[in-house]
Amino acid sequence: MTRIRNYFLTGLVIAGPIGITLYLTWSLIQWIDGWVKPFIPLRYNPDTYLPFPVPGFGLIVAFVALTVVGFLTANIAGKTLVSYGESLLGRMPLVRNLYGGLKQIFETVLAERSNTFKKAALIEYPRKGLWAIVFIATDTKGEVSHKLEPSADTISVFLPTTPNPTSGFLLFVPKTDVMELDMSVEEAAKLVISAGLVNPDYPRKLAVKKPGRKSEQPPVLEPAD
């Protein structure tokens, strides 16, 4: 019975992540197809003349369409048209706030020049002596930076929650209180999601010294507990 239980748990560990990944990928493809395919003309939609639906065709069309839109708006005429459209949206009281916020979020997350969430770190939260993992966003800017500047040089960090790292808190912390980690953001996210059960490998450097003189031996790498 012990062997059977071990075999079952091993199979669950292997098949579980694969099954969930395939399910989420398939759900995403179906969701995009459901949004895009109704806008495709019937003559170009393979579902109209094939006895079975073609999954992923809407995803391909959406990718091509977004690429074409980006190409058209990269020239002077496209930029002028986009600027004119944004000026019209800017005159609408409710729409301009929604559009401006969404545009800023997309530019911050998707822009290649953005350094968002490139580092994981530790801060003392919610009180001294308790530590929490955070993702470093950027230096504090704007009015918040101006108000906090006399007291400390602060940095903006995102504190994720367990087990859902997409929700959390935005904190403005003094740079001196932020302890950067060597682990990647992906490894830190795994640590948060697993509630500390999945820890990335970290070699601890231990210098071997002899009494009375400096050691000439190189550091010994040992895995951390």
Image (spheres, rainbow, N blue to C red):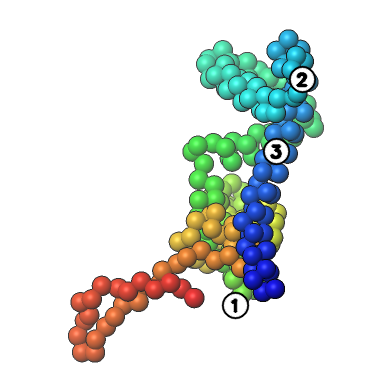
Q: Which mark is residue 104?
A: none
Q: Residue furthest bottom?
A: 211
Neighbor class of circle 3 (other Cα within 10 Å; few <14, some 14-19, many 20+) is few
- 129 w.r.t. 34: above or below: below
- Sequence-first disc among 2 and 3: 3
Amino acid identity at mark 1: Gly
Amino acid identity at mark 2: Pro
Q: Nearer the viewer, residue 188 or 172?
A: 188
Q: Nearer the viewer, residue 159 or 55?
A: 55
Position of residue 174 measured from the top left corner of the image (x, y, whole percent)? 54, 62
The structure residue drawn at horizontal position 68% and vertical position 69%, both measured from the top left corner, is 5
- Sequence-first disc among 3 and 1: 3
Q: Could you tell me if residue 193 is visible in this image?
A: no
Q: Which mark is residue 129?
A: 1
Q: Picture quarter containing residue 30?
A: top right
Position of residue 28 measured from the top left corner of the image (x, y, whole percent)? 70, 37
Amino acid identity at mark 3: Trp
**Residue 29 appears left or right of 146:** right
Q: Picture quarter containing residue 214?
A: bottom left
Q: Nearer the viewer, residue 8 or 57?
A: 8
Q: List the residue tagged with mark 3.
A: 26
Q: List the residue tagged with mark 2.
A: 51
Position of residue 74 measured from the top left corner of the image (x, y, whole percent)? 53, 20
Q: Could you tell me if residue 186 is visible in this image?
A: yes
Q: CA distance from mark 2 to mark 3?
A: 20 Å
Q: CA distance from mark 1 to mark 2?
A: 64 Å
